[in-house]
């Protein structure tokens, strides 16, 4: 079945179509959930909850724009609901620069990068994921999280500095190991 047909059948609550839709997007959807979850188990829970919301709201999908983008927004919003109580350090000064932490080392694996992103405190990981991994603007993030753009910039800055420090440590350790 083509995606439009699967979606049409899902709107009719057809279990077979729901299963096909799930199988079609499960890996991508899990990746989205993993970025916004504190652990692998939380990501699994967020995936399950998010997919149920997608099936419940699929009638609202009009066919305009990407289904994947529409569903991704639901998954992100669902995962962010779990962090309603997270306290973001409020920043009054909205002039924090959008700092780039550049690291040129091809020896750092994607698995390690994902691991250190997951080790970030929740508020930093959320803002980092929204801005860097999913391309939301500071304005969009501030609206999603109900915080100022200065706070989003500050949290992004802190996340990047923590990641940069961890990457520099592993880079130095690899350099020292190869020099011996």
Image: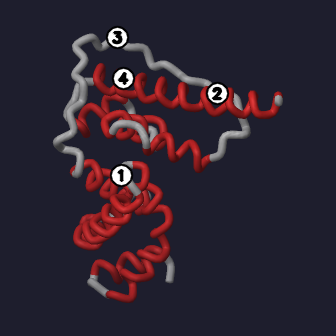
Task: Determine which quarter of the picture holds residue 10.
Answer: bottom left
Instruction: Measure how far apart labels 4 and 1 are at the Cα level.
Output: 21 Å
Q: Secondary structure at mark 2?
A: loop
Whether residue 136 is visible, yes or no, is: no
Mark 1 burial class by Cα count in 10 Å: few <14, some 14-19, many 20+: many
Q: Earlier in the sequence, mark 4 or mark 3?
A: 3
Pick whichever, 62 or 91, lies toward us.
91
Q: Residue at x 35, y 37 (%)?
A: 121
Which residue was labeled with disc 1? 37
- The image quadrant where one finds the C terminus is top right
Whether residue 114 is visible, yes or no, is: yes
Pointer 2 and pointer 4: residues touching (CB < 8 Å)? Answer: no
Horizontal relation, residue 166 to residue 140: left or right: right
Horizontal relation, residue 143 to residue 98: left or right: left
Instruction: Measure how far apart labels 1 and 2 are at the Cα level.
Output: 25 Å
Instruction: Measure how far apart labels 2 and 4 are at the Cα level.
Output: 20 Å
- Disc ID at residue 153: 4
Q: Earlier in the sequence, mark 1 or mark 2?
A: 1
- Disc ID at residue 95: 3
Q: Earlier in the sequence, mark 2 or mark 4?
A: 2
**Colour scheme in the image?**
secondary structure
């Amino acid at each position: 079945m083509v995606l439009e047909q699967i979606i049409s059948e899902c709107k009719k609550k057809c279990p077979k179509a729901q299963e096909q839709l799930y199988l079609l997007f499960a890996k991508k959807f899990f990746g989205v959930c993993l970025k916004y979850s504190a652990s692998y188990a939380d990501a699994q829970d967020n995936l399950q909850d998010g997919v149920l919301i997608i099936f419940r709201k699929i009638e609202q999908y009009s066919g305009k724009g990407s289904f994947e983008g529409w569903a991704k927004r639901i998954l992100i919003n669902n995962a962010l609901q779990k962090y309603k109580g997270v306290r973001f350090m409020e920043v009054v000064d909205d002039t924090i620069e959008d700092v780039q932490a550049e690291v040129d080392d091809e020896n750092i694996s994607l698995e390690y990068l994902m691991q250190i992103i997951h080790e970030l405190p929740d508020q930093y990981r959320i803002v980092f994921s929204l801005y860097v991994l999913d391309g939301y603007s500071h304005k969009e993030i501030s609206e999603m999280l109900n915080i100022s753009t200065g706070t989003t910039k500050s949290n992004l800055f802190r996340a990047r500095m923590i990641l940069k420090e961890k990457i520099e440590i592993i880079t130095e350790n690899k350099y020292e190991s190869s020099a011996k």
